[in-house]
Amino acid sequence: MKNGLKYIIALLLTGMITVVQAQYSSTDIRYSSGHGPYPITINFQGSYAGNKNLFREFINDFNTKFGSDNRVALGGFSTNLEVVIVSPHFLRMFGWQGLSIQGGKLGINYRSFSKNIRNKENLRIQFHDETIGINFGHRFNLLYPFTMEVMGGPTIYNFSTISDHEDIRNDVDTSFTRTRLGNGIFERDPDQRKLCSGLDLKIRLNIFDPGGTEGGLGLVFEYGRMFTLGKRDLTALYEDFLDSAKESSKNWDYGYFSLGMTFPLALRMVSQ
């Protein structure tokens, strides 16, 4: 895990140097105004959720039972496909006249967190949390090359999967037990089907935002807060994985940090 983190940091630092060297210097495009010709972007970020997450108490109880020392924090990644609204008359194509939304932003987000905890008897429990959400927001121009975004929107898929495995000589056997908690819009089970399973809010700082200039790479720093609608019953986790009758029902609300890079898609759209 530590080596992987060092690799990610080195990659981001290398990308930062590349970004600084590759940006355009023309005075015509030195303003991240939102009128850039490449408004559609995709970004990839490493994400981190601290100790105040849904599984904190369970992991601590696991450590107590097996005498292990597993950390509680979750690590993962996220990716966003987004478009900057580059024209003040963008909505005319839908028949809405005179409404200006220049600086608006739309996107879809996928975020994944993973966590493995182990004991001395080769038992490994894997947590995997996935979220898909729709984002709406606004983009503010700061001093070049910085822009800030405030975004938020509903999550339409929000599930946690917990499974146990037996690690023998670095080989992983098929999991014995699998528990799945959450809600999604396309679920077959009516009890797990929900149009909106939560609300995801975030504030973001961009450096060399390619959606507002002539393209190139950009850096993104993000803090977000996830609010899940309703509670999740973790009682089955204690029964299946710890042979315990402990009852536990918690809200799956958490804060997270993300750091990554933004890439413009080669879909040129001239706004003026």
Image: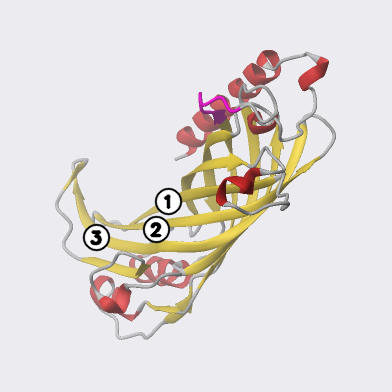
**Crowd around label 3: few <14 · some 14–19 · many ≥20 (10 Å):** many
Residue 16's spot in the image, x, y percent?
65, 24
Numbered badge on residue 129? 2
Q: Which residue is mark 1?
A: 112
Question: What amino acid is found at the position of numbered circle 3 in the picture?
Answer: Asp
Residues at marks 1 and 2 touching, judged by CB atoms closer than 8 Å: yes
Q: Is residue 202 visible?
A: no
Question: What amino acid is found at the position of numbered circle 2 in the picture?
Answer: Asp
Residues at marks 3 and 2 touching, judged by CB atoms closer than 8 Å: no
Depth check: give the residue in front, 123 or 175.
175
Residue displayed at 61% across by 58% down = 152
Q: Which residue is mark 3?
A: 164
Residue 206 sits in quarter: top right
In magenta, the rendered stretch is: 263-269
Give the dominant element type of the magenta stretch: helix, strand or loop: loop
Badge 3 element: strand
Residue 87's spot in the image, x, y percent?
68, 39
